[in-house]
Image (cartoon, rainbow, N blue to C red):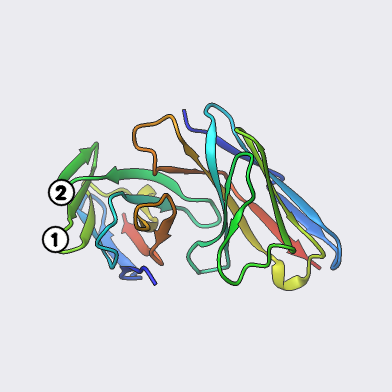
Amino acid sequence: GAVVSQHPSWVICKSGTSVKIECRSLDFQATTMFWYRQFPKQSLMLMATSNEGSKATYEQGVEKDKFLINHASLTLSTLTVTSAHPEDSSFYICSARDGGRMNYNEQFFGPGTRLTVL
Amino acid sequence: QKEVEQNSGPLSVPEGAIASLNCTYSDRVSQSFFWYRQYSGKSPELIMSIYSNGDKEDGRFTAQLNKASQYVSLLIRDSQPSDSATYLCAVNEGYGNKLVFGAGTILRVKS
């Protein structure tokens, strides 16, 4: 149980284009999903928290107009990196919280999406 | 700013030994504590969660929590080369559901 998928697993795009990353909870309903970014040899950096049916809450310093998050259903959240630039190249990882579990603060991570912007 | 501190390592232990990983946190209100394992190039995998003071055992893993000292640890018994990874300590922020992650401790188990 508690499986989270992400698609695509890797993407290469040209500077200025937009990239959409999907995060799905496969066997549970995710009341809350989180988006993280991880640069090489660094720890996870939380970008935003999204709750189903409401606007995402972005962390300080994260541009909400650049990183668009949609959480339209209890099993799907999407992150769109708009007008991507080389400095956006990173490992993007989503996680999901199962509101039906007793240990409700547990987060289960997707496999991540490696974005390279040329 | 809530903080979670870990020794970056690398911590090197021989195969079969006990690996001891430590973590301290700053938020006295935190109630949920987690250990994640992250292999190079992969995403984190939850291996232990602990919510009350004391020890919690799961197979070769034991998590220990001391809220008074704001300290949480992970013991790995009979360490195997496959345990070589970065171990991330995570603590929930305040009364909410966001997690604050430490920078991670690199563990190397040598055969």
Where's residue B99, x and y in %?
42, 55
Q: Which mark is residue A98?
A: none
Q: Between A81 and A53, which is closer to the camera in this rendering? A: A53
Query: From the viewer's perspective, is residue A66 above or below residue B92?
Result: below
Q: Which mark is residue B68?
A: 1
Query: From the viewer's perspective, is residue B9 above or below residue A37?
Result: below
Q: Which mark is residue B53?
A: 2
Provide the chain ID for the residue under circle 1.
Answer: B
Regarding mark 2 in the picture, which secondary structure is present there?
A: loop
Identify the amino acid type marked 1.
Answer: Ala
Where's residue B49, x and y in %?
30, 44
Identify the amino acid type marked 2.
Answer: Asn
Q: Between B1 and A13, which is closer to the camera in this rendering? A: B1
Residue at (78, 70) in percent of width and height: A85
Answer whether residue A102 is visible to the viewer in this image: yes
- Residue farthest to the front? A54
Residue B7 quadrant: bottom left
Q: Are marks 1 and 2 on the same chain?
A: yes
